[in-house]
Image (spheres, grey):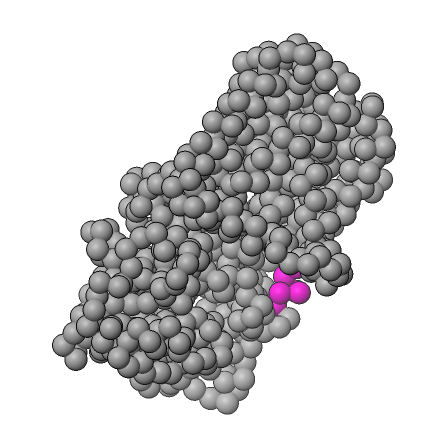
Amino acid sequence: MNWLNALDVAGFRWVNQSWANPLFDAIMPWLSGNPFFAPTLVLALVLLVSLGGVRGRVCGGLLILALVVGNVVVFEGLKEFFGRARPFVDLADARVLVGRGGSPSMPSSHAANWFLGTAILLIYYPRTLWVMLPLAVGVSFSRVYCGVHYPSDVLAGAAVGAGLGFGGVGLLEWVWRSLGRRWFPLWWRHLPSWRKPVWHADALAWQPDAPVIRDAAAVADRQWLRLGYGFVLVMLLVRWAYVASDTIQLSEDEAYQWLWSKHLALSYYSKPPMIAYLQWVGTTLWGDTELGVRFFSPLCAAVISLLLLRFFAAQVNARAGFALVLALTATPLMAVGSVLMTIDPPLVLFWVAAMVAGWKAVQPHGRTRDWAWVGLWMALGFLSKYLALAQWVSFALVFALWPPARRQLGKPGPYVALAVSLLGTVPVLVWNAQHDWITVTHVSENAQLDRTWAPTLRFVWDFLGAMLGLLNPVFFLGLGWAGFHVWRRRRLHPLGLYLLLMGAPVFLGYAAFTLYGRVLPNWIAVSVVPLFAVLILYGEARWRTNERRWLKPAWVAGLTLGLTAVTLLHESNWIAKLTGQPLPARLDPLRRVRDWDQVARVVGEERRKLAEEGRPVFVIGDHSGVTGLVSFYLPEAKQAVQAGAPFVFVRSADHPENQFFFWPGYAERRGQNAIYVIDTDRPVPAPERLVREFESVTDLGVRDITSRGRVMKRLQLFACRGLR
């Protein structure tokens, strides 16, 4: 390996330094990344899909799919596996002509992507080789010339990219020929080959030797259902792989609630206990890793999709169910909830489960057993988030506005559901009774009930802007249109009315609250699924009546815009690869879930320096989020948490401000030193309480946490000596 590495370094220096000349110094950075690449790529894909017929659509679709899978799973996974440093890290004489990437070096993503595209285009359009291959070679060469990759990095990238392109298309063709005829007979008759795509309009007449299809409608419905199952499984595996790939790190809430899972209780200061127990199970299975913490979030998203798919297959058709699952996948707010493990994924899951069970329960033939399931799901929802109680408002409106449902009020079912759901409040009530009803105080403060009401439009525009972005602009406008028409014809569409009442009260309630105070986007999460169900239900009705003139372009636009946003939301660094310039730190959507390991490293270094004075040193966080993150990403701090002897605490207080108030603090560490950590953009003086607690407090200054030349976070550190 030593001689191979020496050969690689020699090859790098030969290209990076011996080939240096003013012309290449101008051309090669442009090849590595330029502002024209992204719009040219988008235009090429649009032309390919819109003008290329069946072959163009198949080629364009596979190209997009391969690029997404390659960059999300394969290329980044290999980078993390090899963990090779960039040349400019180890070689002081490296000439660096472009930005210093922060990701590992092996393989080169630029080379992998270009050779991936070259391979797929070669399969469908062989003549493109004369254009694509020189470009792929030129871009790969530029990465070495510009000083950001070794020759072996680009060779490996080229091999991986070409292998994924040829192998992916070959694998798809083999699977389609082996399974497509049996599982998707109608579609297989239309398109018997992905490698040589030819569309046969008359699916039943084509290939007369194939088995006879007697009920095409039933077969089509089964095909959509199978496609939905496959899609849900693939998305579950991709999300688990993404969570385990270290592309993003924990958020403040996730790390804070990870500490809860080490102190299991009936409830907590600000939230019910479900999140702690789910994280406990996840970390028991997968260890104290990002995958362990987030294991249940992709699983919740998958179960939600399966519930909706089967519900719509039974009540509408499987095609509409698949469309609903696909629309939710293309919605940024739901995409975030399918990865980050906060209290919202289990809440949405149990809300949807109660909604599905409730539709069966409110029917004239609804049984007490159906209502018992409703009560159970609502109880579990309450143990996830207190907002679950709002679903009783939805059911009350169903009883009030749909006469057939009112018949259930004369039966024991609804009251059984109420009794079962109230059982879910018992652990929270017991814990609060033991802690002076602190949660009631916290929730009322969050709702700003102690403030004088003064209407304002400031928060309204913030809310609407967030909804446009996080719910997909096309779909958000469609929700309003579909909701209006379903409400206007509510007597003719009982399912549409039911779904509307399962989501609209929460959404409209929070929208009204914006006249009073700020509403965080995730607060409306439970309303998203039922409102999107209304949208798809209305769209399916329009489609069946042939009122499609605007429906198909709107659907394509919504999916294209949404899937693009969701993809970039999972890896914002792709913007730098496409445009040659990274996003400004303040605009990076992943800023909150990156670089916490660097924060912990800086804190750990200062802790070790202070420990050289001879006294034990602990760490104090300014708030619960940074305390949880340092506890998770500082290796010795994580080991201490696992051993039940943490040395990272939150700043002390006279009254409860977070869950740390109810756990042992640092008061017993008299005489010890501490590092105080503030995550802030502006230097601030040390808190007076902290100054009183220690013999001396010294400001260590502000530390910049950088990535790709951007300041992502700023820390202010204080050395606190001699706890009184």
- The magenta region covers 37-44
Does any portion of residue 473 appear in the rendered image? yes
Question: Residue, x 16% and y 78% (percent of image)?
Answer: 612
In the rendering, at what x and y percent does residue 710 appear? 48, 75
In the rendering, at what x and y percent does residue 691 appear? 34, 77
In the rendering, at what x and y percent does residue 295 appear? 40, 42
Residue 25 to residue 402: above or below: below
Residue 270 to residue 148: above or below: above
Does any portion of residue 371 appear in the rendered image? no
In the rendering, at what x and y percent does residue 216 appear? 68, 17
Nearer to me, 267 or 643: 267
Which SS does the magenta portion mostly show? helix
State yes or no: residue 39 in magenta. Answer: yes
Q: Quadrant of the C terminus?
A: bottom left
Question: Residue, x 63% and y 61% (percent of image)?
Answer: 41
Residue 464 to residue 137: above or below: above
Residue 191 to residue 263: above or below: above
Question: Residue, x 25% and y 54% (percent of image)?
Answer: 641
Task: Locate residue 288 relative to residue 158 in the image: left or right.
Answer: left
Question: Residue, x 69% and y 27% (percent of image)?
Answer: 396
